[in-house]
Image (tube, rainbow, N blue to C red):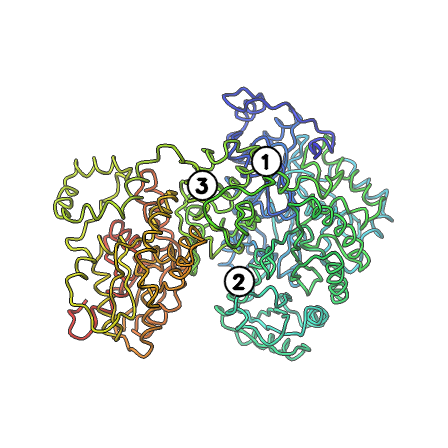
Amino acid sequence: MGDHGQHDGVRRGKRGGGRGGADPLEAELRAAVRGSVDFGPSARALTTMDASNHRRVPVAVVAPRDADDVAAALEVCRAHGVPVVARGAGTSVGGQATGTGVVLDLTRHLRAVLAVDPEARTATVQPGVVLDRLREAVRPHGLTFGPDPSTHSRCTLGGMIGNNACGAHSVAWGTTADNVHELTVHTYRGATLRLGRDGRGAPDGVTDLVRNHLAAIRTGFPPGLPRRISGYALDALLPERGTDVARAFCGSEGTLGVVSEAVVRLVEAPAARALAVLGYADEGAAAEAAPGLLPLGPLTVEGMALDLVRDPAARARLPRGAAWLFAETGGATPAEAAAAARALLRAADALDGAVVTDPAGQRALWRVREDAAGTATRTPEGAEAWPGWEDCAVPPARLGPYLRDFRALLAAHGLRGTPYGHFGEGCVHVRIDFRLADPDGVRRFRRFSEELADLVVAHGGSLSGEHGDGMARAELLPRMYGGELVGLFGRFKDLWDPDGGMNPGVLVRPARLDENLRFDVLPRTPVDVEFAYPDDGGDFRAAVRRCVGVARCRVEGPGTGADVMCPSFRATGEERHSTRGRARLLHEMLAGEVVADGWRSPEVRDALDLCLSCKGCRSDCPVGVDMATYKAEFLHHHYAGRLRPAAHYAMGSLPALLPLAAPVAPLLNAAARVRPLAALAKRAGGIAAERDLPELARETFRAWAARRPAPPGAPRAYVWPDTFTDHFTPSVGRAAVTVLEAAGVPVALPPGRVCCGLTYVSTGRLDRARAVMRRTLDALGPVLGAGAPLVVLEPSCAAALRTDLPELLPGDPRARAVAASVRTFAQALEELAPDWRPPRLDRPVAGQTHCHQHAVLGDAAERRLRERAGLVGELSGGCCGLAGNFGFERGHHDVSVACAEDRLLPAVRAAAPGTELLADGFSCRTQLAQLAGRRARHLAEVLAGALPGRPAP
């Protein structure tokens, strides 16, 4: 573990306490920079890693407000001998977005599209602008930015320039370097350079270096490689290539300077697109077929194999085969695009194929491909798989033989991986099950890396075909380029950065590929935890390692589709409030170096405070990070033996408190309408002053059920009397019973006082949650023996029974039995009364699918039931922002409202008159009532109101 701040001769200045100006570096940065300067453990912990296997700990994070701030920060850092790394979205897989000195966060302020010139087809952007924001800005002009990595919804233009990013459409539009016109760059020495063609902006000595070594540069780079990203692009400086300094800067991975502005080229976006999906016997056959499609001018030729398509629904959409090519075509009209796709289908030597013209169908298939970076982090058997050899490339004509040799090399080392990627350009992505937490696994990682580098070179390839070398492969560049060219790389770097202050340890004089691994700092033995973590072998370290940094949780702007993740990041835009940010803090908590207080850490507590426990990451994160569970685990340990926030006792204990309140519900409701009394109650309970206290029902659902006649015969289902339905909205329970019995399903309530334990779980009172769950299992004995399903009307309670119950009581077979018996209202109707016809309502709907239903239970049965009832339209995704106790807690109101404004409230405002507002969750209904003054209903209430003989809704 060397000090990589010294690889290029930069000294590491002595760090003081980092508080109150005690550190001269901190004091001078604060005086010189108008943006934020953060030496705190949270900011540093959030930037120790990117999406790679590597980790480096910075001393501070600076968010420059403008180009002057960038220059000022560099000047201060140079004066102190502190290295600098520029960082965008942090999705690099080579470790180049990490650093030991000052991290420049260019995403906070430098995120504007400054100008668009439709005539010249250029745009002027700042480095922190997200690619999708640029594409949105130029779409009205019929233009787009051609390169489109799978991280397009969160990656930044600065990061794309640094790594020379490519994406699926480089077959048509090239790499980022092909689409950059001019760059404004600040060097560590303080120069501001405007880079362009004809040598413009090159530091002194650069053009002479190239002129003096023309033969080595002309012959040293492998030919026929559309995806050569490794090393420095010195060949872009050849006179016959226009001495393009901006192009040569692309792919320099932050080692030469910091971009503050870029003029990029735009391309005409096809008005219509179609997708030819071609099935092959195996990936080798698909790889060999890909070059033959290129003369037909496709926009993309992407490849993947069966072992990456793990969702049965996704497999059902694909043609026959064990591997596929996705070849996209464009046209001025849908018919033209479809005709081009059919031409590809006819030309392809495929087992089977299909042309997909439906935009929704195309999006669904591309979603499988874009999520591959996350899906591939687990083998089909569930083992961890890691980057490091994520994107090497060979000439497209060599891809088939290369893949066969690559598979053989994997087998020789006892390793597994799932190749996929840009087959039309010979670029292969793969994550491999290196055991990087084990010293023997690290040694195997090194041996395999050296042999694979030789294999790639033998096939005329590049160690990196898209993501750059970083710390993952730079050590192996001599195997690809030889000593003379690598020596020129070092001299090139020194002309730009003679002090070695820009991202040392990357590309030249690199760190060893097996140094600075992020697994090295984790505890060697498992951590004592409460949940079972069944998908991680019971190991909390492995659960936290799930986050590999692909950052789907960092998508900005209003959400689309059914996705939920990550509402708090959408509301705040802060990394620490993303799923990835929280996972990083938990990783550093386990490491104990930057976040030093373990389970007592205030940094982790504060980051988790705005986690809504929506469970969206459980389903929407490509690697299945489950932050709601991690939060409950953390809160359990953090507050062990300590006084908790008032809300944990007040709202966390609702299942115990509300039965005591039920006999005096009218009196309590009247008191809640007296402002001083309500304010006192809210203050005592840790409830936000902005919130209205929900009204208690005059008669609980249980009381209503107890006084109604028992149905004839044995119940075929049991309706779960959750706390919210029982005490706040018993009308939902009554409606569900009415509809189920109208469908011929006799029902009853479970015996005894049952509770899922949700409120105790969400507040981290896990000992109490287990006690409540065990009492519930005891009460459910007769029900479990009968085999009748449990119909749970509140989605959050259903999700708790389905997941939290067996994960907190893994040794109790009754917990698994209860989890398996849980049904939603629509699932129960579909299963128990398949021939029942619901009443026709024939009206549009708006509202929200509950986040826990989306994440854990699915809503396919609800969709089918709505369709049969003539309820047309889509419910919004996202999270309502109330999320159980979250939106009621003091200090959460603004974020709660912002979450609701993401999708739910706009969808309801846009609904036409007569639209039925649906929300099966109590939180969602309450949020709509309190923020929009609108009443939403559970689907059971809507159907019950339309039954013959019932009053009109």
Residue 622 versus residue 953: which sits nearer the camera? 622
Please say if the residues under marks 2 and 3 sit with CB atoms less than 8 Å apart.
no
Q: Residue 367 carries which label?
A: 2
Residue 649 percent coordinates (x, y): 30, 39
Instruction: Give the quarter of the image for residue 681.
Output: top left
Q: How far apart in space, not on screen, are marks 2 and 3 (Cα)?
A: 32 Å
Instruction: Give the quarter of the image for residue 431.
Output: bottom right
Disc tally is: 3
Q: In the visual, does 439 lie left or right of 948?
A: right
Compared with residue 815, is residue 436 higher up or lower down, i.e. above or below? Answer: above
**Along the polypeptide, which appears first: circle 2 or circle 3?**
2
Q: How far apart in space, not on screen, are marks 3 and 1 (Cα)?
A: 28 Å
Q: Which mark is residue 103?
A: 1
Disc 1 residue crowd, few under 14, some 14–19, many 20+, Cα 10 Å? many
- The residue lying at 20 percent from left, 68 percent from top is 945
Query: Looking at numbered disc 2 in the image, what kind of residue is underneath it?
Result: Arg
The residue to which callout 3 is attached is 634
Disc 3 residue crowd, few under 14, some 14–19, many 20+, Cα 10 Å? many
Query: Looking at numbered disc 1 in the image, what kind of residue is underneath it?
Result: Val
Position of the N terminus by quadrant: top right
Please say if the residues under marks 2 and 1 sit with CB atoms less than 8 Å apart.
no
Q: Can residue 142 be seen in this view?
A: yes
Give the SS element for disc 1.
Answer: strand
Give the SS element for disc 3.
Answer: helix
Position of the C terminus by quadrant: bottom left
